[in-house]
Each structure stands twice: as C-alpha cells, then as structure tokens.
Image: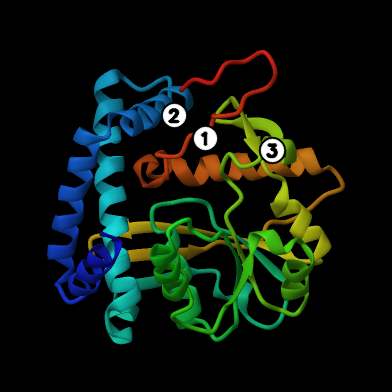
Amino acid sequence: MTKLLLMMMRLAARLPLPVVRALGAALGWFLYAAVASRRRVVQTNLALCFPQWTPEHRRSVVRRVFVLFGQSWLDRAWLWHAPAATVRARLQIVGAFDALTGQTPTVLFAPHFMGLDAAWTALTQQLQRRFATIYSPQLNPAADAWIYQGRQRFGAPEMVARLAGVKPIVQAVRAGEPLYLLPDMNFDPSESLFVPFFGEPAATVPSLARFAKLGRAQVVPVVTTLTPAGYEVRILPPWSDFPSDNLEADTRRMNRELEAYIERDPAQYYWVHKRFKDRPEGMQSPY
C-alpha cells in the first residue's frame, strides 16, 4: 500500500500546480468528513485559542485547515520529485536575507505551519549554505526512506537523528550550519515547561533558547504561507535580546511571537496536532 501511494506521489509531481491543489483540496475535504476524531482536535484547538470567534466562523476555519492540510501534503509530490526548476519557480523567499549571510551561528525558528517542508526545501535549494535539522525516523520503513530522501534533496543538509543527543546539533550550529528547528509542539512533558499559548497552558519544549545559548547563535524566524502560486517563505529579522538568562521567559516569548505569526492567517497553522494534550497537574486534557 505504501509503495503504491509513493508511486502516485511521483506521478502527481508531473501535474500542473492547479490540478495538484484541486486534488489536495479534495483530499482535505475527504479527511474532514471521514476522520471525525482529528476534526474534533482542530475544533478544540481553535475553540481554546480563539474563544471570541463565532461557531460559524470557527467551522469555516476548521474546513480550511483540512483543505490546506490536504494541499500541503500532496505538494510534497512536486517538492521532492518535480524538476528543480519547477520547484524553484514555486517557492518564493522574501524578507531578511542578510540574517542568513556569512557564518553567523543561527537557529531558525520554523513553527509548524502547513508549508514546513516547503520552507526547508526553499532554503536548502536557494541559499548557498549547508543547513541542519533534527530528524525523527518514521515507523514505516518505506515512508521513512521517502521522507528522508525528500528532505535531503537539495544542499546536502545535515540530518541529525533526534536520539543522537545535543552534542552533534550544537556542533553543527557552531560550525555555521543554520539549525532548522520546530519546537512548537506537545512533545515529552518531562522536558517541557507549561507556558501560555493563546492564554492556555501548553507543554512547550525550551529547546529554542537552549540551542541558541549553547550554540552562541542568533534566532531567525521563518514563517511559511501556502499561496496559489506555491509558497511564500518569509525570513524575519533576528530576535533581539534572545536568549536571556531566564529559560521560562524565553519560552514564553517564543509562544507570544508565534501567536502573532499565526494571527495573520490562522488556518495556515498545523492545528491537527493535539497541542494541549498534556496539562498541568489537576487539569484534564481537552480532547
């Protein structure tokens, strides 16, 4: 089944982008209708984070989240298999290019927007630097090989296994390889701090500040938006006065900055994840 699916993705890479996006939208609508458990996750996340919305508006955003999810998932067909010129034409990098010139140690704050793989592909293809990221192996060997190869397609990036520990990651940062870091999910609660995210306590790993401090690095946000023409990848200016000597304050700031990025177009964020799965003692999971 997995091999057939991957074959279909390679075939989809040959299709015009409007056709791929139409198929992705159909996939999103199917998932919205068929996977009720995940639909409830998105509804719960949005209800907690945007309580001021009307039920009608929330339902419309939930539907758009699934459409964008389906489109971004199917877009990996052309990101990883279309000709390089096609990929480059569909990925537009804008913003603070100067932040990624030279050899300044850098940690890229790359939140889980729908275009997270598009941003990685754009940076590794279009910027003349070697990048690094942390890789979590997939349970399915065929899917794992496909994702691994896709993320290594351009720029010979360094893929550090999550279980390899901190040392190789810090070494890569200090060597001038920008670290593409996605720390905005509910990971191991034993390694997390409960800090506000849209006013709700959210288990948040403080790895952004830790890696920035250990690597003596600047933090540069990268925010990606799915557009009709492909993706826009915005490189934002480096954060000032970060990291500080207060790990919790730094992690709170990360979530505040992320909230501002999300508010520009909330449906672009990866709400299908159980962001509030773990709660402080005495609070029940909202799911």
Q: Residue at the spot x=34%, y=80% of the render?
A: 88
Q: Nearer the viewer, residue 168 or 122?
A: 168
Q: Is residue 206 left or right of residue 139?
A: right
Of labels 1 and 3, earlier in sequence is 3
Q: Which amino acid, by three-letter code, is at mark 1? A: Arg
The amino acid type of the residue labelled 2 equals: Asn
Residue drawn at x 37%, y 72% is: 92
**Helix, strand or loop for disc 3:** helix
Residue beneath disc 3: 252
In which quadrant of the rendered image does the N terminus lie?
bottom left
Observer able to see residue 94:
no
Query: Can you tell which mark lies on residue 61?
Result: none
The residue identified by callout 1 is 275
| Label 1 – label 3 distance at C-alpha | 15 Å
Between residues 142 and 280, which one lies in front from this camera angle?
142
Picture layout, residue 18 above or below residue 64 = below
Is label 2 in a helix, a strand or a loop? helix
Q: Residue furthest top?
A: 282
Q: CA distance from mark 1 to mark 2?
A: 7 Å
Query: Nearer the N terminus, badge 2 or badge 3?
Result: 2
Indicate which label's residue lies in the foreground, 2 or 3.
2
- Mark 2–mark 3 distance (CA, rounded to whole Å): 19 Å
Q: Are marks 1 and 2 in contact (CB under 8 Å)?
A: yes
Q: Quadrant of residue 121?
A: bottom left
Amino acid type, label 3: Arg
**Which callout, 1 or 3, points to the residue nearer the camera?**
1
The answer to whether residue 245 is above or below residue 72 is above
Image coordinates for residue 82, horizontal then vertical, percent:
27, 79
**165, above or below 100, in the image:** above
Which numbered disc covers residue 45? Answer: 2
* Crowd tier of the residue under label 2, counting other residues whose Cα lies within 10 Å: few below 14, some 14–19, many 20 or above: many
Indicate the position of residue 152 as horizontal and vertical percent values: 48, 77
